[in-house]
Image: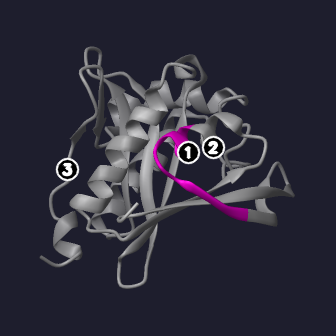
Amino acid sequence: MSFKSKFEEFQTVNVNDSLILRKADPDKDCNAWCKMYRDEETFRYYGGIDGGDHRTPDGMKVILRNQNRDFEKVRMYAWVIADVKTDKALGRIHFSSFENNNKVANIGYWLGRESWGKGIMSACINSAVKFGFSYLELERIYTTVHIDNVGSWKALEKNGFLREGLLRHSFYLSKKLHDCYMYSRLHTD
């Protein structure tokens, strides 16, 4: 099966009895995402959202439609993290930057602050990584994490990711460069 064929039909991932990773619905998810994007603490360590109209309903719908379009163009496999019972959007997790004959990918994620401290992201990372290794047939999954984002690197370490080192001035956030840690997990880990 070719890598591109794995993007022909979007795959929903059941995390557990409470959580699901599903395709974005721009109309349904817009309000929840706007609320989360307006909370600066949610994005304290997440780069790439400075400026733009991402906090407005129209701007958010564009972001959500682009997320789905990036799937169709085989650029990103992005899920909305949702509550199974209410289908409320809680955050996002994705694979991007497919490299080395599509065997290596970056994992990125964020979670609305009201969902922090409940083990949600750790469970979602676990499910996404299993999907990446089994369905996408990745060999290596990596990410960079702001050095002060303790919750994120603990979730990665809990899921078998190894800290490979410090990348100095490599994380652009709030209009300046910060240090970050590089983490990875191999299919064989």
Is label 3 in a helix, a strand or a loop? loop
Lower sequence index among marks 1 and 3: 3
Q: Nearer the viewer, mark 2 or mark 1?
A: 1
Q: Is residue 40 left or right of residue 104?
A: right
Quadrant (top left, top right, bottom left, bottom right) of the C terminus: bottom left
Q: Is residue 12 left or right of residue 69?
A: left
Disc 1 residue crowd, few under 14, some 14–19, many 20+, Cα 10 Å: some
Is label 2 in a helix, a strand or a loop? helix
Q: Nearer the viewer, mark 1 or mark 3?
A: 1
* Magenta span of residues: 155-165
Disc 2 residue crowd, few under 14, some 14–19, many 20+, Cα 10 Å: many
Residue tagged 3: 11
Where residue 110 sits: x, y (%)? 55, 39
Residue tagged 1: 157
Check whether the beta carbons of the residues at disc 2 and disc 1 lie within 8 A of each other: yes
Q: Residue at x 15, y 57 (%)?
A: 9
Q: Residue at x 52, y 62 (%)?
A: 142
